[in-house]
Image: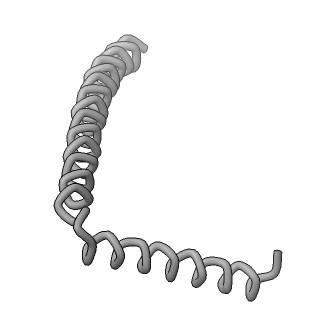
Amino acid sequence: MSNKSKELATFILGAAVGMAIGYFINSDKREEFLETIKDKAGKISEEIGEQLDKGKEILGKLASKGKAGEGKLEKTMDGQ
């Protein structure tokens, strides 16, 4: 697919999504739509927070292992 075709497809998709959002915001299902969006955003936010916590834990473990390895290396170098 050429770049022009991709750009056109992206534009059309964006316009369709915009029209759908506009329809729901102006319809009688507005409150339901907004509540669904809030729920999804909350779930995504929680998931991101959990993943960040896991990443911090993993980085902490790696840092500890690195410090332990550094100490072993220094002991080995001093013994020579």
Q: Is residue 5 above or below residue 31?
A: below
Please name the colour scheme applied to the rendered image.
Answer: one colour
Left or right of 35, for residue 54? right
Res 69 → quadrant? top left
Relative to residue 77, is residue 9 depicted above or below?
below
Instruction: Indicate the position of residue 47 as horizontal and vertical percent values.
Output: 28, 38
Q: Which residue shows up at 58% across the image and 84% down it?
A: 11
Where is the C terminus found, in terms of image quarters? top left
Q: Say which quadrant the N terminus sits in.
A: bottom right
Instruction: Depth check: give the residue in front, 64 or 47.
Output: 47
Judge from the rendering whether residue 47 lies leftward or rightward of residue 10; answer left or right: left
User: In this image, 67 relative to 77: left or right?
Assistant: left
- At a point 28% along the width and 22% down the height, the residue shown is 61
What residue sits 81% from the left and 81% below the top?
2
Q: Residue furthest right?
A: 1
Residue at figure coordinates x 67%, y 78% from the top left: 9
Query: Residue 7 placed where, x, y %?
Result: 66, 84
Q: Is residue 24 above or below residue 14?
A: above
Foreground residue among 76 and 23: 23
